[in-house]
Image (cartoon, grey):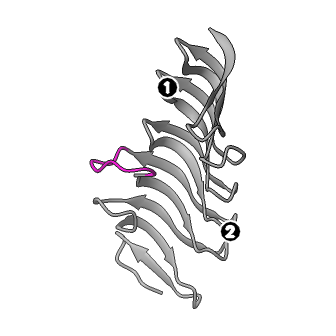
């Protein structure tokens, strides 16, 4: 393993960190196409992000920090809106669909962009907002209990 840098075809920095066979492997930082804004920092394995790290929006704002598998959020983590407020913190499971940022919530806290708590509890189904057992907090202050039967 050696330290090194990789570049996009346009000459902009693509990656800097540990390399094996000229491929990211070990600790490193990946950059968006502009070569200056980080898209990922953490461990790599076989050229891809591996295990735990931080993903960023193209603006440079933190998008997600925690565990993942491939490019999917899996395990414990915290996801952020592009404005910087927390979107979700808790546990994720692997999604059967694959695309950048694919994720399914298992259990945790979901927030509105304002930072106000939206829901805490468990999730079900193949959509992020299918609430299972927990408490939903509407923006008007009312509360809905899911899986327990009472609405306030």
Residue 58 appears left or right of 145: right
Q: Main secondary structure of the magenta part?
A: loop
Q: Is residue 11 magenta?
A: no
Q: Residues within 10 Å of mark 2 (few under 14, many from 20)?
A: few
Residue 63 appears left or right of 128: right
**Residue 83 badge:** 2
Q: Residues within 10 Å of mark 1 (few under 14, many from 20)?
A: some
- Corner quadrant of residue 4: top right
- Corner quadrant of residue 117: bottom right
CA distance for labels 2 and 1: 30 Å
Q: Residue at x 66, y 77 (%)?
A: 114
**Residue 18 % position (x, y):** 64, 18
**Which residue is under mark 1?**
47
Q: Are marks 2 and 1 in contact (CB under 8 Å)?
A: no
Secondary structure under the numbered disc 2 in the rendered image = loop
Secondary structure under the numbered disc 1 in the rendered image = loop
**Residue 6 % position (x, y):** 62, 27
Image quadrant where one finds the N terminus: top right
Q: Is residue 86 above or below residue 19?
A: below
Toward the front, the furthest residue is 10
**Residue 27 % position (x, y):** 65, 23
Q: Residue at x 64, y 37 (%)?
A: 11
Q: Is residue 97 magenta?
A: yes
Q: Residue at x 66, y 40 (%)?
A: 12
Q: Is residue 50 above or below residue 144?
A: above
Toward the top, the furthest residue is 1
Q: Residue at x 28, y 60 (%)?
A: 125
**Residue 126 badge:** none
Q: Is residue 5 above or below residue 150?
A: above
Q: Is residue 6 above or below residue 132?
A: above
**Residue 144 % position (x, y):** 45, 80
In magenta, the rendered stretch is 94-101
């Amino acid at each position: 393993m050696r330290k090194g840098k990789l570049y996009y075809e346009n000459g902009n920095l693509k990656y800097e960190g540990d390399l094996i066979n000229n491929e990211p492997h070990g600790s490193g930082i990946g950059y968006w196409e502009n070569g200056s804004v980080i898209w990922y920092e953490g461990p790599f394995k076989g050229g891809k992000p591996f295990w735990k790290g931080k993903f960023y929006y193209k603006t440079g704002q933190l998008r997600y920090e925690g565990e993942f598998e491939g490019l999917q959020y899996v395990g414990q983590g915290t996801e952020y809106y592009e404005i910087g407020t927390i979107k979700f913190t808790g546990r994720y499971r692997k999604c059967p669909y694959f695309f950048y940022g694919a994720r399914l919530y298992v259990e945790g806290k979901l927030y509105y962009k304002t930072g106000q708590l939206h829901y805490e509890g468990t999730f079900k189904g193949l959509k992020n907002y299918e609430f299972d057992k927990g408490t939903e907090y509407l923006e008007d202050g009312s509360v809905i209990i899911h899986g327990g039967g009472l609405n306030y």
